[in-house]
Image (cartoon, coloured by chain):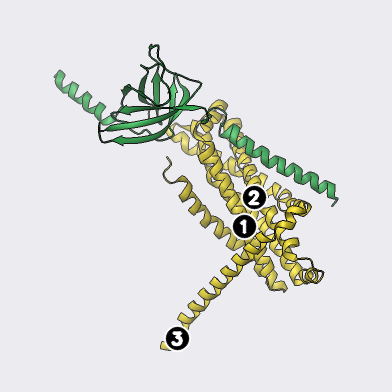
Amino acid sequence: MQRTTMDLWVGLFVMAGIAALMVLSLKVGNLNVYNPSQSYILTGNFENIGGLKVRAPVKSAGVVVGRVTDIQFSTQTYDAIVTMSMDSRFIFPKDTFASILTSGLLGEQYIGLAAGGDEDMLTDGDKIMKTNSAMVLEELIGRFLFDKAAEE
Amino acid sequence: MFRHALSAIQNIGHRVIEGMWRLGHASRFFILVLLKSGTSLRRFGLVIRELYFTGVLSLIIIVVSGLFVGMVLGLQGYETLQKYGSESAVGTLVALSLVRELGPVVAALLFASRAGSAITAEIGLMKATEQLAAMGMMAVDPVSRVVAPRFWSGVISMPLLAAIFSVMGVYGGYLVTVVFIGVDEGTYWSQMQSAVDFRFDILNGFIKSCFFGVAVTAIAVFEGYDAPPTAEGVSGATTRTVVSSSLVILGLDFILTAFMFRGVS
């Protein structure tokens, strides 16, 4: 085979391979949406995180604005400390409300942020004061039964 | 009776020693190839020539099997997921199973049987027809002139082939579930994008395929170079290449998966 033809085919092959890697990162992995290099850290204490996991999304109005990077247990307050890495394009007021929500009936759990009305904004390393725990099915059923019993 | 037992134990010992000796020989050969890779870097044309044979000629089998694996995944995934009313997750299923496991592993298995066996047969035949010895006579080092370019071409083409396999699989799944069955197109892509992480899934799959590339080509060149210079020797070496590189791929995959994905999720 001619040398130049072979070079051409190899060039095409390498380009196809690199294009495939690009497609994987951009189209399948959606690399461009969330860039962790420009981020700030927020923490929040939750009484009960339910099934929240590291890498779960942090959403506001349904849009992904950050990710959970770490979950620790505090022996001082006996609750969970959740660390979030937030996209620095999105800033939130100091009195933002963080709650653990579930997407769909049995879907994955995420942190939902509802912005408050404070003038001051949360900055890197701040702690979200207003939190709402995850909904635990057993507690919910227990409360329902208790209410039913009280009615009668 | 006692003598039979003794000879059986001797037999085991002999096999173990033989295997260890061969493993050591293979490791020394691997290091030798790495040390003598300078020529393939300086004369990169040699590697490009081998890239044509290992990479470009493997392209058809990789593209076709990637497409079909993705189509089957889409079909089976849809059939099972729709029982639970979550057929929207089919994109996630196809993409995650391809990027994390099937892409690197199946591409490496195909690569071992398509390109690895060819490398072994070629080097083994060159040895059997005394071409390697003739090169040595002309003061051309056969390891740096014949073995190292083949090794590096395999190492370069394996990750690219695995990436092409995964992309073809994702589009195969798209073809079946979105075009034929009618899952919503936006759901297919958005569910996939929210579940697949660049660092945890795509980068780890890429690293896996790099490991497989090194393992498969190292085994292939060693078996070829070590083959007894007879027709049976070359055929036995080719078989051994396919069998042992397939086993190494599967074993290595388990170890790498245990390191990469343990503690995640």
Tell me what residue is drawn at x 36 percent, y 22 percent: A98
Chain with colour yellow in the figure? B
Q: Going from the N terminus, do you reach mark 1 or mark 2 first?
A: 2
In this view, the residue in front, B78 or B14, is B14
User: Within 10 Å of the Cα at label 2, are there few (<14), some (14-19), or many (20+) other Cα atoms?
Assistant: many
Numbered disc 2: what chain? B
Tell me what residue is drawn at x 34 percent, y 36 percent: A72
Question: Gap in Å between the C-alphas at discs 1 and 2?
Answer: 9 Å
Is the Cβ of the residue at disc 1 closer than 8 Å to that at disc 2? yes
Secondary structure of residue under mark 1: helix
Question: Gap in Å between the C-alphas at discs 1 and 3?
Answer: 39 Å
The image quadrant where one finds the N terminus of chain B is bottom left
Relative to A66, does residue A93 appear above or below in the rendering? above
Relative to B143, does residue B50 appear above or below in the rendering? above
On the image, the x and y values in percent for residue A135 come to 31, 27
Please name the residue that numbered disc 1 is placed on.
B216
In this view, the residue in front, B182 or A85, is A85
Relative to A98, does residue B120 appear above or below in the rendering? below
Relative to B77, does residue B2 appear above or below in the rendering? below
| Left or right placement of residue A97 versus residue B205 in this view | left
| Left or right placement of residue A135 versus residue A41 in this view | left
Tell me what residue is drawn at x 47 percent, y 39 percent: B80
Please name the residue that numbered disc 3 is placed on.
B4
In the image, what residue type sits under mark 2? Met
On the image, the x and y values in percent for residue B249 come to 56, 56
Numbered disc 3: what chain? B
In the image, what residue type sits under mark 3? His
Q: Colour of chain A?
A: green
In this view, the residue in front, B185 or B113, is B113
